[in-house]
Image (spheres, helix red, strand yellow):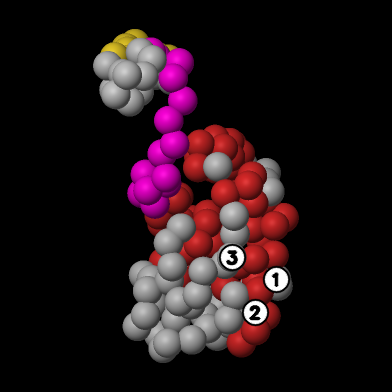
Amino acid sequence: GAQLAVFKDGKPVIHLGGGVMDPGGGAVTERTLFQIRSITKALTATVMLMLHDKGHFTFDDPIFHHWPGFEKNGKGGVTIGQLMSHRAGLTERAGLRMVDYQNRAAIVRAMENLSPGGGANVAWADPDQRLSVAFLCNAMLPQNTAWGQRYRQIGNAVYACFS
């Protein structure tokens, strides 16, 4: 099944759903919920690039400058650029269970407790890399601006869909 939503000036002009959820499953409507998982990468990267353009960070900034606690277990030198380009050298899984993805504190703790290993050119285990960028992005969003508040709302919605 699939859905399509088109907005103009912040208002929905088309909102459709059709097909089935799975073989023998129920019909897809415009209210059917889907897990979006990898789609979060593009949204999170876009918001991070907007934050970069507005001067909130450089790609050479160590992550712990924006996320105190991330430097645990030898990650103090890991930069935002390395994390976003999958070169942080963090190859282990965070050990999260599906139920843990509904608990932000558990996710933050797991990301902070990861240890580097395998060198700077080793990709980070997905979905853990995606979650770390999302939490870093959320930490840097300005609280006192309309765009910061709007993207925080979008990020929370994406997180809810992911979990």
For the point 56% across and 78% down, which residue is it?
62
Residue type for callout 1: Pro
Question: Residue 32 colored magenta?
Answer: yes
The answer to whether the residue labelled 1 contacts the one labelled 2, judged by CB atoms less than 8 Å apart, is yes
For the point 45% across and 16% down, which residue is it?
31
For the point 38% across and 15% down, which residue is it?
26
Label 3 secondary element: loop
Where residue 138 appears, as percent x and y from the top left, is 59, 52
Q: Which quadrant of the view contains residue 119?
A: bottom left
Q: Which quadrant of the view contains residue 122?
A: bottom left
Characterize the magenta stretch by its predominant secondary structure: loop
Stretch in magenta? 29-43
How packed is label 1: few (under 14 Cα within 10 Å), some, or many (20 or more)?
Answer: few
Q: Which comes sooner in the sequence, label 1 or label 3? A: 1
Labelled disc at residue 71: 2
Label 2 secondary element: loop
